[in-house]
Amino acid sequence: MARIAGVSLGTASNVLNNPEVVAGPTRRRVQEAIAKTGFVRSTAAHQLRVGRSLTVGVVLLDLANPFFGEMVRGAEGVLRDKGYVLMVCSSDESVDQERRYLRALEEHRVDGLLITPVERDLKGLVALSARGVPTVLLDRDPGGLGLCSVTVDDVRGGELAAGHLLELGHRRVGFVNGPLSIRQCADRRTGAKRAFRWAGLRPEDGLVEVTVPALTVDHGEEAVRELLAKKPRLTAVMCANDLLALGVLRGLAGAGVAVPGDMALVGYDDVAFASMLSPPLSSVRQPKYELGASAATLLLEEASEGAHEHRSVRFEPELVVRASTGSALRTVAGSRYRKARAGARPQSTGAVEGT
Amino acid sequence: MARIAGVSLGTASNVLNNPEVVAGPTRRRVQEAIAKTGFVRSTAAHQLRVGRSLTVGVVLLDLANPFFGEMVRGAEGVLRDKGYVLMVCSSDESVDQERRYLRALEEHRVDGLLITPVERDLKGLVALSARGVPTVLLDRDPGGLGLCSVTVDDVRGGELAAGHLLELGHRRVGFVNGPLSIRQCADRRTGAKRAFRWAGLRPEDGLVEVTVPALTVDHGEEAVRELLAKKPRLTAVMCANDLLALGVLRGLAGAGVAVPGDMALVGYDDVAFASMLSPPLSSVRQPKYELGASAATLLLEEASEGAHEHRSVRFEPELVVRASTGSALRTVAGSRYRKARAGARPQSTGAVEGT
DNA sequence: CTTGCTACGTGAATCGTTTCAAGCCACTTT
DNA sequence: AAAGTGGCTTGAAACGATTCACGTAGCAAG
């Protein structure tokens, strides 16, 4: 072993961990030996003795999806400085795969876990957490169970999108949404309705829903026919995500409907290409990097504190206004919504914390 | 310890690793004990004894970039079945950060390393490899040094893009390229020229280069003015990546130039939104997932074989033809290129392997 | 000269697993 | 009945780092 090459044994450990306790000359001698022999300390042995693996597990649906990629970067930014390395796992929305990975991560004794769980039942994670693995849910509500979480307020996001259109004076708004079994879709719908109510309008009158089976470009394009058939005619459309919006955009172009001239359009997610479309797409942005960074911070807290109180951090999505929603309609109706909104809710900035 | 709860000691290990050597009743007893006590084997201790960490390090430039995300998925697909977990690290193109991560990964005793190195000098990696860490370069040429690598043939990619335009009969082709210091840019340029030569044309006459400082949408848009000023006028443009192409597309739209009517356009990378543009963009696709999967396979080979001979796998990019390049010009010139191409090179399918 | 103190260094014990030589037992063979 | 055989099980050693109760030397004070 490197230390023998140097001099003593346990002292070498001190050179690495408590340099100040070792006398100058000895320290130097050991360091030279380390350099000469190319000694590299073994995390495994360290872990066995000390108990920390210097490793954090990250389980998400699909790393190829930039949403998750960016989120992981957020976590990485916080954790790498603390000496942690990330074990990243894509569950591919398979409960089985997720279980296998969780097992592996537990065997590796990860010092923490960030996860966007596939499995509906969070019992397993609660148990894991109870077994001593600090756990933070990513973009998933802990539903009262004792777990930390970081989420984005999708209700608020839906409200932002719809509210923006209402502010511009639109009163007949199409809403191309995915299946309500997807929590995000249901939440955004709730938000959109809320915006209407705050404007003193009945959602049943003004919000015209079209449900598609999946959030894809093609389904968006197909939805256009249905949207255009609505009477009285719509002046704006909001979509549950940007892919749908892109499809709608294309469909409208095909039908000769000008955006935003004849129809305003707003998407959701603010994916990379939203700003590159013609016209650039207004959208609702999710703070992906911050989501990951904040989750990592929560993790560190949970890992250090003795008695930890679980917390949920909820981020506010952000409306990004671009050309696809154009300027206000020439009606005066818009101002009513603005006033209602202003009174209804205190100005909120940044993340809201609770529970 | 779980085993004491069960019965014996070393036997428990056999239940886990050589179940067939343990008698039925004993085995069952131990398994029950394992279930009851919630025993989870420690990879660290396992590693300490056996020497394998069941871990593979992946170092890339930026995980938020879908190119890398997809590549990692490719590697993950191959490695997870073998029981490996990936330690994913973003170097952010910082040599320092890369070094720190490499250090950490070596301390973790990763069983292998996949890396898109930032540092030009590969000595450190060669040394690491010599120290017994199987290493595969991702999208980076090993330059004769003893390392495995997986790359995409960018020369061929440039040739594909230019060749496609030549086949369509274009003879004056703009090439919006990034700085030649980026290997990819230089290679794609080389390939474009080669396509011209194979068509019996002089690149100096037909290929009109415009160099921009960075591969962004904005620089693409700015390049349009320059492109349109060229005499004799261009009929097609190829770009070093899709962002540039998108910028060009937008610039052309602004200038009232129809695509592909007045100008054909081909990009590079085939990013997610290429197919969603109007018109959908022809582009050169890189087999990202396969890149990662193949790298992982190479890694496994290197890890298992005793005397390993380093190999390089080179992938062929693939031309994806969409509406932005339209149909053949009404000249007959196109066929000449087609014939030359057909004779010059045997049909190659899939990956080409070599030293 | 002895005692006590400080400042360093030592080496055994420990973490959880695997490996392996050796032990045990029942049963067969001669 | 002694020796041999095969099937299971055992317990100690080892992996590499950390920790901690001690040992040792040097020095000052009494």
Image: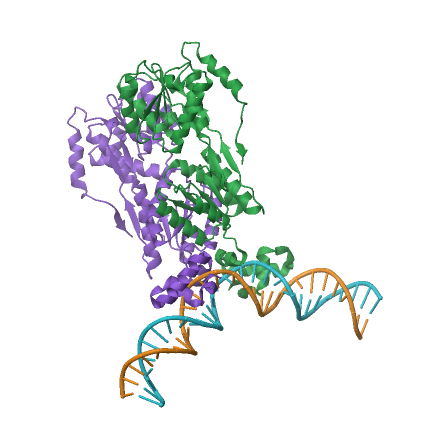
Chain colours: A green, B purple, C orange, D cyan
**Picture layout, residue A330 above or below residue B200:** above
Rendered residue at 38%/32% (across/down): B215
The quarter of the picture where residue A172 lies is top left
Q: Is residue A178 something one can see in this rendering?
A: yes
Please tell me how many numbered marks the rendered image carries.
0
> Front-most of A237 and B338?
A237
Rendered residue at 37%/36% (across/down): B180
Residue B194 appears at what percent x and percent y? 25, 37
Q: Is residue B193 something one can see in this rendering?
A: no
Residue A297 appears at what percent x and percent y? 53, 40
> Front-most of A92 and A36?
A92
**Picture layout, residue D29 above or below residue C26:** above
Residue A23 appears at what percent x and percent y? 65, 59
**Picture layout, residue B53 above or below residue B231:** below
Residue A207 appears at what percent x and percent y? 37, 19
> Front-most of D14 and B263?
D14
